Image (cartoon, rainbow, N blue to C red):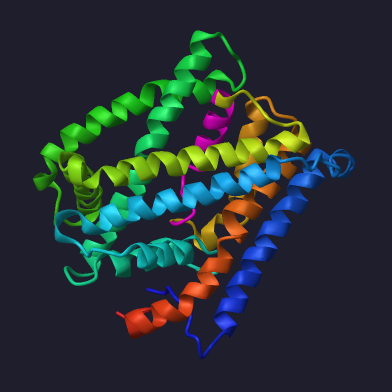
Amino acid sequence: MGVLPRLRAPLPLLVTTGAAAVAFLAALAVMSAIAGWSKVTSQLHPNLSLWFAAAFGLELLAFCAYVFAYRSIAAVEGGPKLGLVEAAELVAVGFGAFLAKGGAALDSEALRRGRGGEHEGEVRVMALDALEHAPLAPAAWAAAISLLANGKHKPGLDFTIPWATLVPIGAALAVIGVRRRDRFVDRDGWRGKLGDVLEAIHVLFRLLAGWRRYWPGFAGAAVYWAGDVLCLWACLRPFRAALPFAGVVIAHAVGYVLTRRTLPLAGAGVVEVLMPLTLLAAGAPFAGAILGVFAYRIFNLWLPLLPAAAAIPRLRKRYGRRFDVHPRRT
Protein backbone atom coordinates (compact mmCIF):
# COMPACT_ATOMS: atom_id res chain seq x y z
CA MET A 1 0.00 0.00 0.00
CA GLY A 2 1.66 3.25 -1.13
CA VAL A 3 1.55 6.27 1.05
CA LEU A 4 4.38 8.61 1.92
CA PRO A 5 7.31 9.46 -0.37
CA ARG A 6 10.85 8.66 0.69
CA LEU A 7 12.98 11.69 1.40
CA ARG A 8 15.88 10.10 -0.51
CA ALA A 9 13.75 9.66 -3.62
CA PRO A 10 11.89 12.91 -4.34
CA LEU A 11 10.98 11.90 -7.89
CA PRO A 12 7.69 10.14 -6.95
CA LEU A 13 6.62 13.26 -5.02
CA LEU A 14 7.34 15.45 -8.04
CA VAL A 15 5.68 13.02 -10.44
CA THR A 16 2.46 12.63 -8.49
CA THR A 17 2.23 16.35 -7.73
CA GLY A 18 2.81 17.06 -11.41
CA ALA A 19 0.14 14.54 -12.38
CA ALA A 20 -2.31 16.21 -10.01
CA ALA A 21 -1.47 19.63 -11.48
CA VAL A 22 -1.96 18.34 -15.03
CA ALA A 23 -5.31 16.78 -14.11
CA PHE A 24 -6.35 19.98 -12.34
CA LEU A 25 -5.45 22.27 -15.26
CA ALA A 26 -6.81 19.85 -17.86
CA ALA A 27 -10.16 19.75 -16.09
CA LEU A 28 -10.20 23.56 -15.99
CA ALA A 29 -9.40 23.71 -19.72
CA VAL A 30 -12.02 21.15 -20.69
CA MET A 31 -14.75 22.79 -18.61
CA SER A 32 -13.81 26.23 -19.97
CA ALA A 33 -14.00 24.92 -23.51
CA ILE A 34 -17.46 23.53 -22.84
CA ALA A 35 -18.68 26.76 -21.25
CA GLY A 36 -16.98 28.92 -23.88
CA TRP A 37 -13.57 30.52 -23.48
CA SER A 38 -14.88 34.01 -24.01
CA LYS A 39 -17.45 33.64 -21.26
CA VAL A 40 -14.85 32.30 -18.85
CA THR A 41 -12.17 34.88 -19.63
CA SER A 42 -14.70 37.70 -19.28
CA GLN A 43 -15.06 36.66 -15.64
CA LEU A 44 -11.34 36.90 -14.91
CA HIS A 45 -11.58 40.32 -13.31
CA PRO A 46 -13.20 39.53 -9.97
CA ASN A 47 -13.64 42.06 -7.24
CA LEU A 48 -10.66 41.20 -5.06
CA SER A 49 -12.39 42.20 -1.86
CA LEU A 50 -12.29 40.25 1.37
CA TRP A 51 -14.02 37.20 -0.12
CA PHE A 52 -10.80 35.32 -0.88
CA ALA A 53 -9.40 36.21 2.54
CA ALA A 54 -12.64 34.89 4.04
CA ALA A 55 -12.30 31.70 1.97
CA PHE A 56 -8.77 31.18 3.26
CA GLY A 57 -9.88 31.65 6.87
CA LEU A 58 -12.83 29.30 6.46
CA GLU A 59 -10.69 26.56 4.91
CA LEU A 60 -8.13 26.98 7.68
CA LEU A 61 -10.94 26.59 10.22
CA ALA A 62 -12.15 23.49 8.38
CA PHE A 63 -8.67 21.97 8.45
CA CYS A 64 -8.25 22.56 12.19
CA ALA A 65 -11.68 21.10 12.89
CA TYR A 66 -10.86 17.98 10.86
CA VAL A 67 -7.85 17.36 13.09
CA PHE A 68 -10.17 16.89 16.07
CA ALA A 69 -12.41 14.53 14.10
CA TYR A 70 -9.35 12.52 13.06
CA ARG A 71 -8.09 12.22 16.63
CA SER A 72 -11.46 10.95 17.83
CA ILE A 73 -11.63 8.19 15.23
CA ALA A 74 -8.07 7.21 16.09
CA ALA A 75 -8.71 7.00 19.85
CA VAL A 76 -12.09 5.23 19.94
CA GLU A 77 -12.13 1.62 21.16
CA GLY A 78 -8.54 1.64 22.35
CA GLY A 79 -6.99 3.07 19.23
CA PRO A 80 -3.88 5.24 19.11
CA LYS A 81 -4.02 8.52 21.03
CA LEU A 82 -2.59 11.07 18.62
CA GLY A 83 -1.30 14.43 19.75
CA LEU A 84 -2.53 17.59 18.07
CA VAL A 85 0.68 18.14 16.13
CA GLU A 86 0.92 14.55 14.94
CA ALA A 87 -2.75 14.48 13.93
CA ALA A 88 -2.38 17.81 12.10
CA GLU A 89 0.61 16.46 10.18
CA LEU A 90 -1.25 13.29 9.22
CA VAL A 91 -4.28 15.29 8.09
CA ALA A 92 -2.12 17.68 6.06
CA VAL A 93 -0.32 14.85 4.27
CA GLY A 94 -3.60 12.99 3.72
CA PHE A 95 -5.10 16.07 2.11
CA GLY A 96 -2.11 16.44 -0.19
CA ALA A 97 -2.49 16.00 -3.94
CA PHE A 98 0.77 14.02 -4.15
CA LEU A 99 -0.70 10.80 -2.72
CA ALA A 100 -1.40 8.65 -5.76
CA LYS A 101 -3.79 6.40 -3.84
CA GLY A 102 -5.39 9.16 -1.80
CA GLY A 103 -5.06 9.86 1.89
CA ALA A 104 -6.93 6.69 2.84
CA ALA A 105 -3.74 4.66 2.36
CA LEU A 106 -1.92 6.83 4.86
CA ASP A 107 -4.85 6.73 7.30
CA SER A 108 -4.96 2.94 7.22
CA GLU A 109 -1.40 2.81 8.54
CA ALA A 110 -1.70 5.61 11.08
CA LEU A 111 -5.07 4.74 12.61
CA ARG A 112 -4.15 1.14 13.34
CA ARG A 113 -0.77 1.92 14.86
CA GLY A 114 -0.18 -0.20 17.95
CA ARG A 115 -3.14 -2.52 17.50
CA GLY A 116 -4.80 -4.60 14.83
CA GLY A 117 -3.70 -5.36 11.31
CA GLU A 118 -4.38 -4.03 7.85
CA HIS A 119 -8.07 -4.95 8.00
CA GLU A 120 -8.56 -3.06 11.25
CA GLY A 121 -6.93 0.00 9.71
CA GLU A 122 -9.18 -0.17 6.65
CA VAL A 123 -12.27 -0.36 8.85
CA ARG A 124 -11.15 2.75 10.71
CA VAL A 125 -10.59 4.55 7.42
CA MET A 126 -14.19 3.78 6.47
CA ALA A 127 -15.28 4.98 9.91
CA LEU A 128 -13.43 8.23 9.29
CA ASP A 129 -15.23 8.58 5.97
CA ALA A 130 -18.56 7.89 7.69
CA LEU A 131 -17.77 10.54 10.29
CA GLU A 132 -17.01 13.02 7.51
CA HIS A 133 -20.43 12.42 5.98
CA ALA A 134 -22.31 12.28 9.28
CA PRO A 135 -23.01 16.04 9.32
CA LEU A 136 -23.02 16.51 5.53
CA ALA A 137 -25.86 14.08 4.84
CA PRO A 138 -28.31 15.67 7.35
CA ALA A 139 -27.32 19.13 6.07
CA ALA A 140 -28.04 18.09 2.48
CA TRP A 141 -31.32 16.52 3.63
CA ALA A 142 -32.36 19.73 5.39
CA ALA A 143 -31.36 21.79 2.35
CA ALA A 144 -33.37 19.53 0.04
CA ILE A 145 -36.43 19.71 2.32
CA SER A 146 -36.11 23.51 2.43
CA LEU A 147 -35.91 23.81 -1.36
CA LEU A 148 -38.87 21.47 -1.86
CA ALA A 149 -40.96 23.25 0.77
CA ASN A 150 -40.30 26.61 -0.90
CA GLY A 151 -41.12 25.25 -4.36
CA LYS A 152 -37.64 25.91 -5.72
CA HIS A 153 -36.83 24.19 -9.02
CA LYS A 154 -33.09 24.87 -8.97
CA PRO A 155 -31.57 22.35 -8.50
CA GLY A 156 -34.13 20.05 -10.07
CA LEU A 157 -36.14 17.32 -8.40
CA ASP A 158 -33.60 14.74 -9.54
CA PHE A 159 -31.21 16.40 -7.06
CA THR A 160 -33.51 17.30 -4.19
CA ILE A 161 -35.82 14.28 -3.95
CA PRO A 162 -32.99 11.71 -3.58
CA TRP A 163 -31.43 13.70 -0.73
CA ALA A 164 -34.83 14.25 0.91
CA THR A 165 -35.72 10.56 0.83
CA LEU A 166 -32.55 8.49 0.77
CA VAL A 167 -30.83 10.08 3.77
CA PRO A 168 -33.44 8.99 6.34
CA ILE A 169 -33.82 5.62 4.63
CA GLY A 170 -30.06 5.14 4.69
CA ALA A 171 -29.91 6.08 8.37
CA ALA A 172 -32.59 3.53 9.23
CA LEU A 173 -30.86 0.81 7.22
CA ALA A 174 -27.57 1.62 8.92
CA VAL A 175 -29.09 1.12 12.37
CA ILE A 176 -30.67 -2.19 11.32
CA GLY A 177 -27.51 -3.36 9.58
CA VAL A 178 -25.21 -2.63 12.52
CA ARG A 179 -27.42 -4.67 14.80
CA ARG A 180 -27.11 -7.62 12.41
CA ARG A 181 -23.54 -7.13 11.30
CA ASP A 182 -22.41 -10.50 12.72
CA ARG A 183 -24.12 -12.14 9.75
CA PHE A 184 -21.70 -10.43 7.37
CA VAL A 185 -18.41 -9.86 9.21
CA ASP A 186 -15.55 -12.15 8.12
CA ARG A 187 -17.58 -13.59 5.23
CA ASP A 188 -16.35 -13.95 1.67
CA GLY A 189 -17.37 -11.82 -1.27
CA TRP A 190 -19.87 -9.00 -1.06
CA ARG A 191 -21.05 -10.10 2.37
CA GLY A 192 -17.61 -9.52 3.81
CA LYS A 193 -17.35 -6.09 2.18
CA LEU A 194 -20.76 -5.16 3.56
CA GLY A 195 -19.62 -6.45 6.94
CA ASP A 196 -16.63 -4.10 6.83
CA VAL A 197 -18.91 -1.16 6.09
CA LEU A 198 -21.19 -2.11 8.97
CA GLU A 199 -18.19 -2.49 11.27
CA ALA A 200 -17.12 1.03 10.31
CA ILE A 201 -20.59 2.39 11.08
CA HIS A 202 -20.44 0.53 14.39
CA VAL A 203 -17.24 2.42 15.22
CA LEU A 204 -19.20 5.60 14.59
CA PHE A 205 -21.94 4.41 16.93
CA ARG A 206 -19.32 3.67 19.59
CA LEU A 207 -18.09 7.20 19.12
CA LEU A 208 -21.64 8.44 19.65
CA ALA A 209 -22.10 6.26 22.73
CA GLY A 210 -19.05 7.92 24.31
CA TRP A 211 -20.04 11.42 23.20
CA ARG A 212 -18.92 13.03 26.46
CA ARG A 213 -15.38 11.98 25.62
CA TYR A 214 -15.49 12.05 21.82
CA TRP A 215 -17.74 15.05 21.16
CA PRO A 216 -14.84 16.91 19.49
CA GLY A 217 -15.06 14.30 16.72
CA PHE A 218 -18.64 15.15 15.78
CA ALA A 219 -18.12 18.86 16.37
CA GLY A 220 -14.95 18.76 14.26
CA ALA A 221 -16.67 16.97 11.39
CA ALA A 222 -19.57 19.45 11.45
CA VAL A 223 -17.29 22.49 11.51
CA TYR A 224 -15.11 20.95 8.80
CA TRP A 225 -17.97 20.61 6.35
CA ALA A 226 -19.49 23.98 7.31
CA GLY A 227 -16.14 25.67 6.73
CA ASP A 228 -15.57 23.87 3.45
CA VAL A 229 -19.05 24.68 2.09
CA LEU A 230 -18.72 28.32 3.16
CA CYS A 231 -15.27 28.46 1.53
CA LEU A 232 -16.87 27.34 -1.74
CA TRP A 233 -19.63 29.95 -1.35
CA ALA A 234 -17.08 32.69 -0.65
CA CYS A 235 -15.06 31.71 -3.73
CA LEU A 236 -18.17 31.92 -5.91
CA ARG A 237 -19.02 35.44 -4.74
CA PRO A 238 -16.33 37.38 -6.66
CA PHE A 239 -17.41 35.65 -9.89
CA ARG A 240 -21.09 36.44 -9.33
CA ALA A 241 -21.91 32.75 -9.15
CA ALA A 242 -22.99 32.44 -5.52
CA LEU A 243 -26.29 30.67 -4.89
CA PRO A 244 -28.66 30.67 -1.93
CA PHE A 245 -26.96 28.61 0.74
CA ALA A 246 -29.29 25.60 0.43
CA GLY A 247 -28.36 25.29 -3.24
CA VAL A 248 -24.65 25.48 -2.46
CA VAL A 249 -25.02 22.71 0.14
CA ILE A 250 -26.75 20.42 -2.36
CA ALA A 251 -24.22 21.19 -5.09
CA HIS A 252 -21.31 20.61 -2.71
CA ALA A 253 -22.77 17.34 -1.43
CA VAL A 254 -23.33 15.96 -4.94
CA GLY A 255 -19.99 17.17 -6.27
CA TYR A 256 -18.09 15.79 -3.29
CA VAL A 257 -19.78 12.44 -2.68
CA LEU A 258 -16.30 10.92 -2.54
CA THR A 259 -14.00 12.81 -0.20
CA ARG A 260 -10.55 13.99 -1.20
CA ARG A 261 -8.94 11.51 1.20
CA THR A 262 -10.51 8.59 -0.67
CA LEU A 263 -9.92 9.85 -4.21
CA PRO A 264 -6.52 9.44 -5.94
CA LEU A 265 -4.47 12.65 -5.94
CA ALA A 266 -7.04 14.18 -3.55
CA GLY A 267 -9.60 14.27 -6.34
CA ALA A 268 -7.58 16.50 -8.68
CA GLY A 269 -9.35 16.58 -12.03
CA VAL A 270 -12.50 14.94 -10.67
CA VAL A 271 -13.91 17.56 -8.33
CA GLU A 272 -13.11 20.29 -10.87
CA VAL A 273 -15.45 18.56 -13.34
CA LEU A 274 -18.25 17.41 -11.06
CA MET A 275 -18.71 20.47 -8.86
CA PRO A 276 -19.20 23.10 -11.61
CA LEU A 277 -21.80 20.81 -13.19
CA THR A 278 -23.70 20.45 -9.92
CA LEU A 279 -23.51 24.20 -9.36
CA LEU A 280 -24.83 24.73 -12.88
CA ALA A 281 -27.73 22.40 -12.13
CA ALA A 282 -28.39 24.39 -8.97
CA GLY A 283 -28.70 27.61 -10.97
CA ALA A 284 -25.21 29.13 -10.98
CA PRO A 285 -23.82 30.63 -14.21
CA PHE A 286 -21.50 28.06 -15.74
CA ALA A 287 -18.46 30.27 -16.36
CA GLY A 288 -18.59 31.76 -12.86
CA ALA A 289 -19.03 28.31 -11.34
CA ILE A 290 -15.93 27.00 -13.13
CA LEU A 291 -13.75 29.86 -11.89
CA GLY A 292 -15.29 29.75 -8.42
CA VAL A 293 -14.49 26.06 -8.09
CA PHE A 294 -10.98 26.72 -9.44
CA ALA A 295 -10.43 29.33 -6.70
CA TYR A 296 -11.99 27.05 -4.10
CA ARG A 297 -9.63 24.23 -5.00
CA ILE A 298 -6.64 26.53 -4.57
CA PHE A 299 -7.59 26.78 -0.89
CA ASN A 300 -9.01 23.27 -0.60
CA LEU A 301 -6.41 21.28 -2.53
CA TRP A 302 -3.17 23.15 -3.15
CA LEU A 303 -2.54 25.21 -0.02
CA PRO A 304 -2.49 22.08 2.22
CA LEU A 305 0.60 20.97 0.28
CA LEU A 306 2.65 23.56 2.16
CA PRO A 307 2.15 22.13 5.69
CA ALA A 308 2.18 18.63 4.19
CA ALA A 309 5.63 19.15 2.70
CA ALA A 310 6.88 20.42 6.05
CA ALA A 311 5.35 17.40 7.84
CA ILE A 312 6.89 14.69 5.67
CA PRO A 313 10.35 14.63 7.30
CA ARG A 314 8.89 14.42 10.83
CA LEU A 315 6.44 11.67 9.87
CA ARG A 316 9.18 9.68 8.15
CA LYS A 317 11.30 10.00 11.28
CA ARG A 318 8.42 9.08 13.58
CA TYR A 319 7.02 6.15 11.59
CA GLY A 320 10.17 4.93 9.86
CA ARG A 321 9.67 2.57 6.93
CA ARG A 322 6.00 2.00 7.61
CA PHE A 323 5.37 4.72 5.02
CA ASP A 324 6.59 4.17 1.48
CA VAL A 325 5.56 5.25 -1.99
CA HIS A 326 6.06 1.81 -3.44
CA PRO A 327 3.20 -0.71 -3.28
CA ARG A 328 3.55 -3.38 -0.65
CA ARG A 329 3.96 -6.82 -2.17
CA THR A 330 1.56 -9.46 -0.93
Q: Quadrant of residue 204?
A: top left
The residue lying toward the viewer, choosing from 156 and 144, is: 144
Question: Residue 279, how many percent across, how many down?
Answer: 64, 33
Quadrant in the picture for the N terminus: bottom left
Question: Residue 168, how many percent across, how many down?
Answer: 31, 24
Q: Quadrant of residue 79?
A: bottom left
Quadrant in the picture for the C terminus: bottom left
The residue lying toward the viewer, choosing from 117 and 292, is: 292
When the figure is inspected, residue 159 is found, relative to residue 197, above or below; the finding is above
Total numbered badges shown on the rendered structure:
0
Residue found at x 18% / y 57%: 188
Q: Answer left or right for 280 relative to 146.
A: right
Residue found at x 38% / y 66%: 85
- Which residue is situated farthest in the bottom direction here? 8
Question: Residue 328, how many percent across, how many down?
Answer: 35, 79
Q: Is residue 205 visible?
A: no
Q: Is residue 235 magenta?
A: no
When the figure is inspected, residue 96 is found, relative to residue 59, above or below; the finding is below
The residue lying toward the viewer, choosing from 103 and 224, is: 224
The residue lying toward the viewer, choosing from 209 and 14, is: 209
When the figure is inspected, residue 81 is found, relative to residue 170, above or below; the finding is below
Q: Answer left or right for 147 relative to 54.
A: left
Q: Is residue 4 visible?
A: yes
Question: Residue 172, how many percent across, how many down?
Answer: 23, 28
Q: What's the magenta bit mostly, secondary-structure-wise?
A: helix
Q: Which residues are magenta?
A: 246-261
